[in-house]
Image: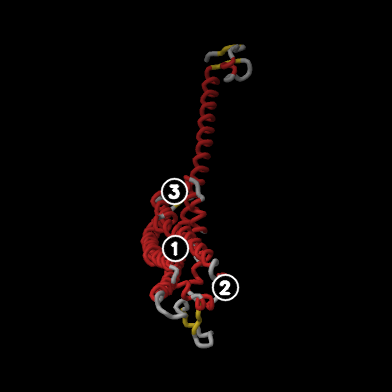
Amino acid sequence: MTVIKEPRKWYIKLFTLGKKFSSKTFSDNTKKFLLNAVGLFVVVNFTFYVENLGDEYETKHKYIKLVKDIRSGMNDILVYSEGYKEKIDFVAERYNNQLDKWEVDNDSIFIDFIVDEEEPDGKYYSAPMNWFKEYDPFNPPIISGSFGIFESGNQDFKLVDPFTTKIIAEIMKGTDLKYLKENTNEIERKMIQEYEEILKEWSRDIDVTEYYHNDFWIKNRRFIQNDGQLKYLLHRRKELWEFNIKYHIEDYSQKVKDDQKILDSMINIFDEEKYFLYWKIN
């Protein structure tokens, strides 16, 4: 066995016990050092791997839970859309009746009624044009709920399942929803502004401060009847509801129904996945 007394080189001293150096000690210590280094490397990297795997596991299960919440909430979208469509049909029918009566020589042409058992004669009378300033932007409640939380997720979150993310994005930002929001908000508001401008012009000749009373529409029937601007504006808004908003609601509702089936399939795939701790085993 080789023995070196008083080793002077620093890298030899690293593997030397006491003041003497031996090749066996050097060899044993080298192996020990390498094994410890490899062991530390493996432990550190495995720890990072498990932590990263755990983060991915948590992200995926948060993603799946939110997808399930969105799927459940899509029924609320359909209920909301159907109710909105019924409202459109109701008001559009009244405006159609109003346009049909526009040229009739009768002081009550701007007054209509709906059946109401609480009224003395079972009818509630009102002027449909009183409703013209009212508008209700299309905004299904879930869009600002679960969808909003999903949208706030980072890129890694949305890449858990790109296909499912794409389906959800279409519901949130699809063309039909975009047009519905635009037509029931911006376009409607512009028409209401035009209506207010008409009332402003009327104020030069009649008292418009009472326009929300039925008597106003009876008393000023002939004056209003001769205003072609109002008639045309009413016609445009009626067409907006009947031939634009209504059909976009129908298309959007059908899209939601189709996407429900797709999400059901994706959720079934997610539910069939089995895990051991953080490891997917199927």
Q: Which label lies toward us, 3 or 1?
A: 1
Q: Amino acid at mark 2?
A: Glu
Counting residues from the N terminus, which is met first, the one under dot 2 or under dot 3? 3
| Mark 3 crowdedness (10 Å alpha carbons): few <14, some 14-19, many ≥20 | some
Quarter of the view holding residue 252: bottom left
* Separation (CA) of disc 1 from disc 2: 43 Å
Q: Position of residue 138 (x, y in %)?
A: 47, 62
Counting residues from the N terminus, which is met first, the one under dot 3 or under dot 1? 1
| Mark 2 crowdedness (10 Å alpha carbons): few <14, some 14-19, many ≥20 | few
Residue that sits furthest to the front in the current view: 205
Quarter of the view holding residue 88: bottom left
Residue placed most toward the observer, 149 or 10: 149
* Separation (CA) of disc 2 from disc 3: 59 Å
| Mark 1 crowdedness (10 Å alpha carbons): few <14, some 14-19, many ≥20 | many
Q: Which residue is mark 3?
A: 160
Q: Residue 74: in sight, yes or no?
A: yes
Q: Residue 69: in sight, yes or no?
A: no
Residue at 51% x, 25% y is 31
Q: Amino acid at mark 3?
A: Val
Counting residues from the N terminus, which is met first, the one under dot 1 or under dot 2? 1
Q: Which residue is mark 1?
A: 74
Residue at 41% x, 66% y is 232
Residue placed most toward the observer, 48 or 223: 223
Q: Position of residue 122 (x, y in %)?
A: 50, 86
* Residue 226 marker: none
Residue that sits furthest to the right in the current view: 18
Residue that sits furthest to the bottom in the current view: 121
Determine whether the residue tagged by mark 1 lies in a helix, strand or loop: helix
Residue placed most toward the observer, 282 or 114: 114
Q: Which residue is mark 2?
A: 210
